[in-house]
Image (cartoon, rainbow, N blue to C red):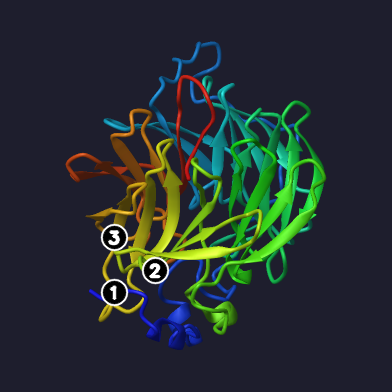
């Protein structure tokens, strides 16, 4: 198997018909969107809990999974052994989510950021965006929230807001008041939002503009770093754009996987990028990293079936060695259990080929099992007894 192949750049510009038929997040057409109907709920609205009125809900145990149902308007609570525990309405087409140490989940939907009490399983509020994203729609190119992250102290939520046809924004939400306190310009389609370990910087990974926006948390000044190891010649028609980022615990560098061939290692202070070799040879999306620096990357499948490998989960040790676990069908995002032994990979790919469930991967044996949950699940988190949790 060869890697770092020069022909990748030659096929960066994909005909429109091919773009419309293959992988998520990698095509310029916006025809996939469809009106969702209705208007955004008011910021103070809340949904009913999953238990009947007057009945105390069963506490949600640690280790339960929370997934964002991109194909619906819900998040689903999942027992990783037995399946769904019930769903809560949050807003149209939820994408990313993050859970704080206080048990509140923040869910980026097309309408606003939903606040969910994971213990009682009810929506507490919907924080509407300040950014004008146009009509509320569904589909891969819908406007509204995409990536989302919490500050280490839990006081701020950062959400990347997609503006169809233009540059996105980073909106800052005060978690106490549940109000948007600032809006910062970023690049196009902010797939992922990450925060430095000390909380001093926020990173927006912008798919359609081949870059990461570095935002200082104190001044909210943005700075652009281009991340394009295959070049940018394909423009919006290119498959070879950044998707998700992991922040390396040891030194704060940003890790962005491309095509199961190249890992872009970005120093956010200098903007310099180094390239390391990867081995999965598949189009890559979701990424997560463990406290010891083990990187997990979701391979969604081949761009060219004659040249590339199928869906997989790459587990990359801090020394760069990799284990590749094949997966059955496309997947999108990944998170890891508290003990680090199990990965949970969502099957809710944003274009054709998605399925309604997650794959549970035993990271010691490589064994996998599929669990039917939710509707096109994308974002995923493990509810932990303490500390924030998110996928990826």
The x, y position of residue 182, in whole percent, is: 82, 45
- Residue wearing tag 1: 308
Element at label 1: loop
At 50% from the left and 85% from the top, the residue drawn is: 13
- Residue wearing tag 3: 329
Is residue 112 something that shows in the picture?
no
The answer to the question of whether label 2 and label 1 lie on touching residues, with beta carbons closer than 8 A, is: yes
Mark before the other along the chain sequence, 2 or 1 = 2
- Residue nearest the viewer, comparing 272 with 346: 272
At 34% from the left and 50% from the top, the residue drawn is: 319
- Residue nearest the viewer, comparing 79 with 194: 194
| Left or right: residue 271 compared with residue 139 | right
Is residue 127 something that shows in the picture?
yes
Name the quadrant containing residue 301: bottom left
CA separation, marks 1 and 3? 14 Å
* Mark drawn on residue 222: none
* Mark drawn on residue 259: 2
The x, y position of residue 68, in whole percent, is: 49, 43
| Position of 209 relative to 365 (above/below) | below
């Amino acid at each position: 198997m060869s890697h770092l192949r020069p022909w990748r750049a030659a096929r960066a510009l994909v005909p429109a018909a091919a773009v419309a038929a293959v992988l998520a997040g990698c095509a310029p057409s916006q025809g996939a969107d469809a009106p969702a109907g209705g208007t955004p709920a008011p910021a103070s609205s809340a949904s009913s809990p999953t238990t009947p009125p007057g009945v105390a809900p069963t506490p949600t145990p640690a280790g339960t999974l929370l997934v964002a149902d991109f194909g619906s308007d819900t998040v689903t609570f999942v027992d990783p052994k037995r399946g769904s525990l019930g769903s809560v309405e949050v807003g149209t087409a939820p994408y990313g989510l993050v859970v704080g140490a206080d048990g509140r989940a923040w869910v980026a939907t097309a309408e606003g950021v939903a606040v969910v009490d994971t213990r009682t399983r009810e929506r507490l509020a919907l924080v509407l965006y300040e950014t004008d994203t146009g009509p509320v729609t569904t589909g891969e190119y819908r406007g509204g929230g995409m990536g989302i992250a919490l500050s280490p102290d839990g006081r701020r939520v950062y959400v990347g807001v997609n503006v169809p046809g233009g540059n996105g924004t980073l909106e800052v939400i005060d978690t106490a008041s549940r109000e948007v306190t600032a809006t910062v310009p970023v690049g196009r389609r902010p797939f992922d939002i990450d925060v430095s370990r000390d909380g001093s910087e926020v990173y927006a990974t912008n798919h359609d503009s081949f870059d990461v926006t570095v935002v200082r948390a104190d001044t909210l000044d943005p700075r652009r770093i281009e991340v394009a190891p295959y070049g940018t010649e394909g423009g919006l028609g290119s498959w070879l754009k950044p998707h998700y980022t992991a922040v390396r615990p040891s030194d704060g560098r940003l890790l962005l996987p491309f095509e199961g061939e190249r890992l872009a290692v970005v120093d956010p202070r200098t903007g310099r990028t180094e390239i390391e070799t990867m081995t999965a040879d598949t189009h890559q999306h979701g990424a997560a990293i463990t406290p010891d620096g083990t990187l997990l990357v979701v391979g969604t499948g081949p761009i060219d079936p004659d040249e590339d490998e199928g869906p997989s989960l790459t587990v990359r040790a801090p020394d760069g060695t990799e284990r590749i676990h094949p997966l059955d069908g496309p997947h999108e995002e990944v998170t890891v259990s508290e003990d680090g032994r199990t990965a949970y990979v969502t099957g809710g790919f944003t274009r054709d080929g998605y399925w309604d469930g997650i794959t549970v991967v035993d990271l010691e044996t490589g064994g996998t099992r599929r669990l039917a949950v939710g509707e096109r699940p994308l974002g995923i988190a493990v509810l932990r007894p303490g500390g924030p949790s998110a996928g990826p």
